[in-house]
Image (cartoon, rainbow, N blue to C red):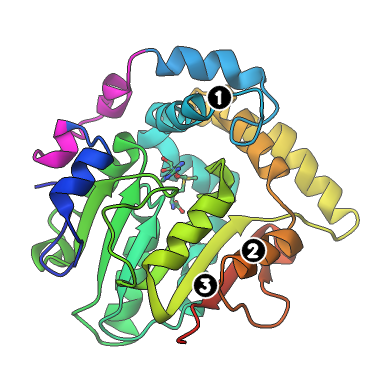
Amino acid sequence: MFTLASRNWACSSVLGAMTKLSLPAAIAGRRINTAAGRPKDTQPPGTAAMARRLSSVPNVAYADSVPMEAKEEIMGGVYHQIANKYDRVATICSLGMNTVWKRRFVHRMRAQPGARMLDVAGGTCEIAKHYLEYQDKVNGDCRSSVHVVDLNTGMLGVGQSRMAGTSWERDGRISFAQGNAEDLAAVADNSVDVYAISAGMHNIPRLDKALSEAFRVVKPGGTFACLEYGHVDTPVLGSIVRWYWDNGVPAVGQVFAEDRPAYERLARSVRAFPHQRDFASLIRAAGFRLPGAGYELFECGMMVAYIGTKPSA
Ligand SMILES: C[S@@+](CC[C@H](N)C(=O)[O-])C[C@H]1O[C@@H](n2cnc3c(N)ncnc32)[C@H](O)[C@@H]1O
């Protein structure tokens, strides 16, 4: 069952939120069919065509020439096309480093036993899986849970299939809902121990809205954890990485996902994402405390982890 709220998860006014989020029937009551190719079949009509039309726009997430509703629709559609292949292509593109980065990111959160995580833009449940593994192995905990929220039902469907049959699913420690990071109306104020978002922020047009929603839902004293592609300032290496984003990543996307435009769009949105210094300032402006510089560079900034807390008073 594709649930909005697992028995371990306290979401307020679920029915009202379902209306507000315009959840499709698949999310409201039925398990999404995640058979191979299904996400592509279920994408909203016209989305693929629109995504193709707009692949020439410098950055789908931020370009002012794209109407706000279209940005959301494009995001919802782009990932439908690649959902089944997303994890494999991410591993190839990063030469396996994605797993290392995500595990390291989860370890940096230092989550307490029993902590409830909201994994926003959680996609195929990569972070959820690493988090629950961490809780099981490092904390010896079996109460912690993850609620995965993503705009895209194709990505969520892949995640749900991956979790199907695991002890986490059997024990009700994982739940899923379609939702937008900019409007997490289904999640109660001050209800989340850990807000996590990995490789999701670069997709979001209104970062201030997403960050203020994050601040609203995290408990005082709770954790904000964001992993995002960064800007590599190291001379030479920075040029190589930028070249790789512009040329290597789209080529890998073409060969292994048969969708070059989706990976060109990814490269553009990563390039347009604020520098880590500036994004740390935005996180602080939303109210979170970030220690030190506000971020940690992974591999010179290929990825950047921002781990902060919501002040208690
Ligand atoms: C690059 S994937 C990352 C998935 C996963 N977090 C990971 O680290 O592997 C980005 C995800 O963000 C989701 N997304 C894009 N815009 C979103 C939004 N406004 N709200 C929620 N999810 C969004 C996409 O559907 C996609 O699943």
Q: Amino acid at mark 1?
A: Pro
Residue under the point 56% across and 71% down: 287
Q: Is residue 3 visible?
A: no
- Say which residue label 3 marks: 104
Residue under the point 52% across and 59% down: 211
Q: In this rendering, is residue 247 above or below 280?
A: above
- Say which residue label 1 marks: 67
Q: Nearer the viewer, mark 3 or mark 1?
A: 1
Numbered range of the magenta stretch: 25-45
Going from N to C along the chain, the mark reached first, 2 or 3, is: 3
Percent across and percent down for residue 263 are 58, 32
- Say which residue label 2 marks: 304
Q: For mark 3, give the secondary structure.
A: helix
Q: For mark 2, give the secondary structure.
A: strand
Q: Amino acid at mark 2?
A: Val
Left or right: where does residue 206 sit relative to residue 72?
A: right
At label 2, counting other C-alpha atoms closer than 10 Å, the crowd grade (few under 14, some 14-19, many 20 or more) is many
